[in-house]
Amino acid sequence: MAENFRQTDILEIAQTEGRVSVDDLAERFNISVQTIRKDLSELADSGQLKRVHGGAILPSGVTNIGYDERRELNRAAKTRIAKRCAADIPDNASVFLNIGTSTEAVARELLTHRNLMVVTNNMNIAQILSANPDCEVIVAGGTLRRSDGGLTGPLTVQMIQAFKFDYAVIGCSALDLDGDILDFDIQEVGVSQAIIDRSRERFLVADTTKLTRPAPVRIASLKDLTRFYTDAQPAMGALEKCMRWGTEVVVA
């Protein structure tokens, strides 16, 4: 087992992306490269990672949970959530969809919508919606993340700031009981914050597995959103906070 929560998160990132780099992890967790090197050495000593120049990889024989496999995790729940969310997006609207398997599920449910303008920093979503002839698709520029087809960085944020969207649909890596929406990648978080700032209606799509895991970087609070779409009733504390904040919880 990993010795601390940060090491657990590092392992999850490695399983998702195939490898981790010292510089990237130091930026994600906002700690020194020396601390990250110590974490990687301890994970390597325990056989959970293998050190390579500049970072670490999964050791031979360890299964990498790739993006395609993550897309299949809790797929039925993601589809239910996506259907409910898409039903609340009318024709003739402008929409932003960000990186994630849940937002990709929403894109599939928008294939029969008419006269949409969808802006996205997710290459997979652009490909999905290219099948809808009544949808104008705009891809936000930025640095390509090959592991999941996401585009992030200052160029992405700069382009988003040129718009005012009717609807934003975002995903996340984790939620905590304080109502904070969390992620691993600080570059992706900056993009999500820009999306929230430039949208009239702000929707979160996240299945309940997101309530059982940590992530180190805060995107926003549920109080900053219009609706939270999920597949089961959240814990009472989180539900009470949403009621107090006026954030609607939609259970699919």
Image (cartoon, helix red, strand yellow):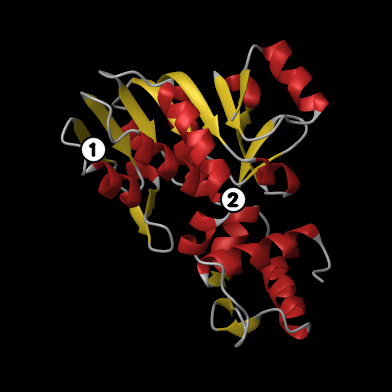
Asked if labels 2 and 1 touch by Cβ distance under 8 angstroms, the answer is no
Dot 2 crowding, Cα within 10 Å, few <14, some 14–19, many 20+: some
Q: Quadrant of residue 93?
A: top left
Q: Which of the two discs, 1 and 2, sits closer to the camera? A: 2
Residue ID for mark 2? 74
How far apart are the two marked residues, 1 and 2, measured between alpha carbons?
Answer: 29 Å
* Percent position of residue 152, x then y: 40, 48
Q: Reply above or below: 150 against 39.
A: above
Residue 213 seen = yes
* Percent position of residue 109, x then y: 37, 35
Dot 1 crowding, Cα within 10 Å, few <14, some 14–19, many 20+: few
Between residue 250 and residue 137, name the one nearer to us: 250
Query: How many numbered callouts?
Result: 2
Residue 12's disc number: none
* Percent position of residue 215, x then y: 67, 49
Residue 141 seen = no
Q: Reply above or below: 68 against 224.
A: below
Viewport quadrant of the N terminus: bottom right
- Amino acid type assigned to the residue bearing label 2 in the image: Asn
* Pointer 1 or 2: first along the chain: 2
Viewport quadrant of the C terminus: top right
Q: Reply above or below: 231 against 147.
A: above
Does residue 226 appear to the left or right of 233 in the view shown? Answer: left
Does residue 184 appear to the left or right of 135 in the view shown? Answer: right
Name the residue located 72 percent from the left edge and 50 percent from the top edge: 213
- Amino acid type assigned to the residue bearing label 1 in the image: Ile
Residue ID for mark 1? 138
Q: Which element type, helix, strand or loop, lies under badge 1?
A: strand
Q: Residue furthest left?
A: 133
* Percent position of residue 187, x then y: 48, 48
